[in-house]
Image (cartoon, grey):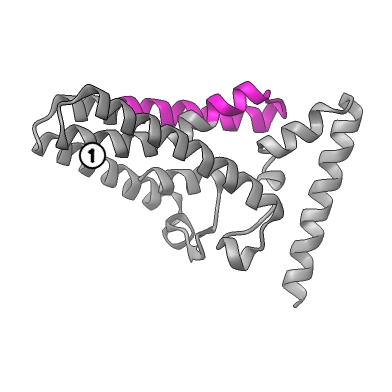
């Protein structure tokens, strides 16, 4: 559900080498499919009759939304600090993976220490996944990554590699760097189309 909604927000045509739902059926249907999948997850949580698991899922939905809003806001303002980047990816990515590991633990044990350990593992795994995904967006090959590269730059999304590059330059230099990166990303796309 969250990946479908993410593709709608990002206007992404491809998800890991496959056409995205919104590309096939457009945004209206894609939103409804994402909503259906999320409500189905809520229903499954009710079926296991565990309030702890339901609380985790509802908190995760809030974090995911907050992280996506932060990403959209930073794309508009073109400003994002390293601390804000970590907050954003913790909300939009780590929350999803840590919810999965924590709900698994909730259904298997009452031991708070084990639950906390799996939650923390999921948070760190989510952070590492997003950082690697952001790096592959700049350095990866589309045929290997399974989605268009340089996507974040085209959409004005600031990721950790860009934050580090831009932090060492003045405001006018930052704009110049972003413009050149966008130019290079458009140029590489044209070369792919010609081939």
Give how far across and how far down residue 45 sits, in percent. 17, 36
The quadrant of the picture occupied by the C terminus is bottom right
Expressed as whole percent of the image width and height from the top left, the position of residue 96 reads 38, 37
Residue at 20%, 30% in the rendered image? 53
Residue at figure coordinates x 78%, y 62% from the top left: 188
Identify the residue at image location x=67%, y=35%: 160
Q: Nearer the viewer, residue 20 or 150?
A: 150
Majority SS type along the magenta span: helix
Asked whether residue 67 appears in the rendered view, the answer is yes
- Label 1 Cα crowd, 10 Å radius (few <14 / some 14-19 / many 20+): some
Q: Across the whole image, how many numbered discs are drawn on residues?
A: 1
Left or right of 77? Residue 111 is: left
Q: In the image, is 119 to the left or to the right of 8? A: left
* Residue 190, above or below 93: below
Q: Secondary structure at mark 1?
A: helix
Q: Is residue 170 above or below residue 1?
A: above
The range drawn in magenta is 59-88
Residues 63 and 179: in front is: 63
Residue denoted by label 1: 104
Magenta span includes 77 = yes
């Amino acid at each position: 559900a969250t990946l479908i909604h993410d593709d709608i927000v990002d206007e992404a045509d491809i998800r890991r080498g496959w056409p995205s739902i919104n590309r096939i059926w457009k945004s209206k249907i894609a939103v409804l499919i994402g909503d259906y999948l999320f409500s189905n997850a809520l229903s499954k949580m009710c079926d296991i009759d565990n309030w702890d698991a339901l609380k985790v899922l509802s908190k995760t939905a809030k974090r995911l939304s907050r992280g996506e809003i932060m990403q959209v806001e930073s794309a508009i303002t073109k400003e994002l600090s390293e601390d804000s980047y970590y907050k954003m990816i913790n909300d939009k990515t780590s929350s999803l993976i840590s919810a999965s590991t924590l709900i698994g633990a909730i259904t298997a044990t009452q031991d708070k220490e084990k639950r906390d350990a799996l939650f923390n593992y999921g948070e760190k795994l989510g952070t590492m996944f997003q950082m690697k995904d952001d790096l592959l967006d700049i350095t990866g090959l589309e045929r290997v990554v399974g989605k268009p590269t340089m996507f974040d730059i085209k959409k004005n999304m600031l990721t950790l590699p860009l934050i580090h590059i831009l932090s060492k330059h003045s405001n006018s230099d930052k704009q110049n760097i972003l413009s050149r990166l966008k130019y290079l990303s458009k140029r590489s796309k044209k070369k792919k189309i010609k081939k």
